[in-house]
Image (cartoon, grey):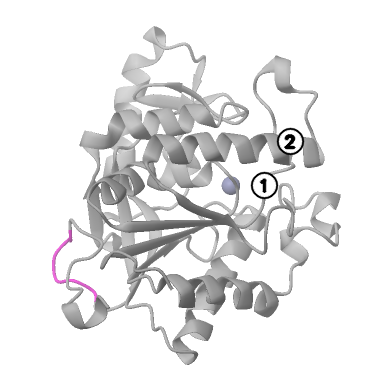
Amino acid sequence: MTELPSRRLMLVHAHPDDESINNGATMARYAAEGAHVTLVTCTLGERGEVIPPGLRHLSGAALGGHRLGELREAMRALGVTDFRLLGGAGRYCDSGMMGLPDNDDPGCFWQADVDQAAGMLAEVILEVRPQILVTYDENGGYGHPDHIRTHRVAMRAVELAAGAGWDVPKVYWNRVPRSVAEESFARLHGDLAELPFEKAGAVDDVPGVVDDAQVTTAVDGTAYAAAKAAAMRAHATQITVAEPYFVLSNELAQPLFTTEYYELVRGERPGSRESDLFAGIGDGEAS
Ligand SMILES: [Zn+2]
């Protein structure tokens, strides 16, 4: 096996674009600081709504292929070279929004056998041996079936890997502190007239918003704001960026966070808020 850097961070996401929106600044920062950053994406987002009119003819596998190209470009922007599709590109397809008949597609990730998918992810964990794994909370942040499935598969894979020789010391869920979301939306409402967007979203539309006390970790990625914005722009079918804001296909403007927030759910909860995902990782865990 090739020698990996001593600090290794893995992120598990549902669709191409989720990594850049949630963790773009974190990924760029740790990659620049010499950590090994691994992204595992579970589907190609074949059922995503396409924003640019010139690309709306894309759907299904053609959209998935296009989004894989967007993901490559985003990873270039973030300086991340190790990114994979769970089980290989096209193994699981996008399940569509909750409640749609798409959810019954036998090839979709919502229908995936959790243990089977988790077994494939556990193999990647055993190969990379990350000290840190980042994913969503049990609601997938906002209730999308692929995000909920990603959560279950990632948490199960951590258990399976622990039983097979690599116990991931720290697992985090993506979070946004309520006070940060409220301040950001207040600023957004003030700026809206100047923006290329018509409408503003609301605090509770932001995935992972929780009471401040629940947030254990804040990673300041301000120095990597440009890389994060470039990565988000690379996902042009899904995102329109006007820094420090962006819209998805629902056209509701929301803040682009360059400090990214987390809740530690495996590992010893810190007494005060950490500023580094690797805080407390000793040399013994770094091999
Ligand atoms: Zn997603």
Q: Are marks 2 and 1 in contact (CB under 8 Å)?
A: yes
- Comparing 144 with 48, the one in front is 48
Residue 145 x/y as whole percent: 67, 57
Write down the quadrant of residue 76 in the picture. Answer: top left
Task: Check residue 58 in the rendering and tell me which mark sits there, or answer none.
Answer: none
Q: Residues within 10 Å of mark 2 (few under 14, many from 20)?
A: many
Residue 42 x/y as whole percent: 62, 57
Residue 139 x/y as whole percent: 55, 61
Q: Quick one: SS at disc 2?
A: helix
Q: Say if residue 201 shows up in the picture.
A: no
Residue 245 x/y as whole percent: 39, 25
Q: Quadrant of the N terminus?
A: bottom left
- Comparing 225 with 283, the one in front is 283
Residue type, numbered disc 2? Leu
- Comparing 121 with 212, the one in front is 121
Residue with the mark numbered 2: 63
Q: Quick one: SS at disc 1?
A: loop
- Compared to residue 19, the image places residue 248 above or below, namely above
- Compared to residue 117, the image places residue 43 above or below, namely above
Q: Residues within 10 Å of mark 1 (few under 14, many from 20)?
A: many
Region of the chain picked out in magenta, as a range: 269-274
Residue with the mark numbered 1: 44
Residue pictured at 62% horizontal, 61% vertical: 86
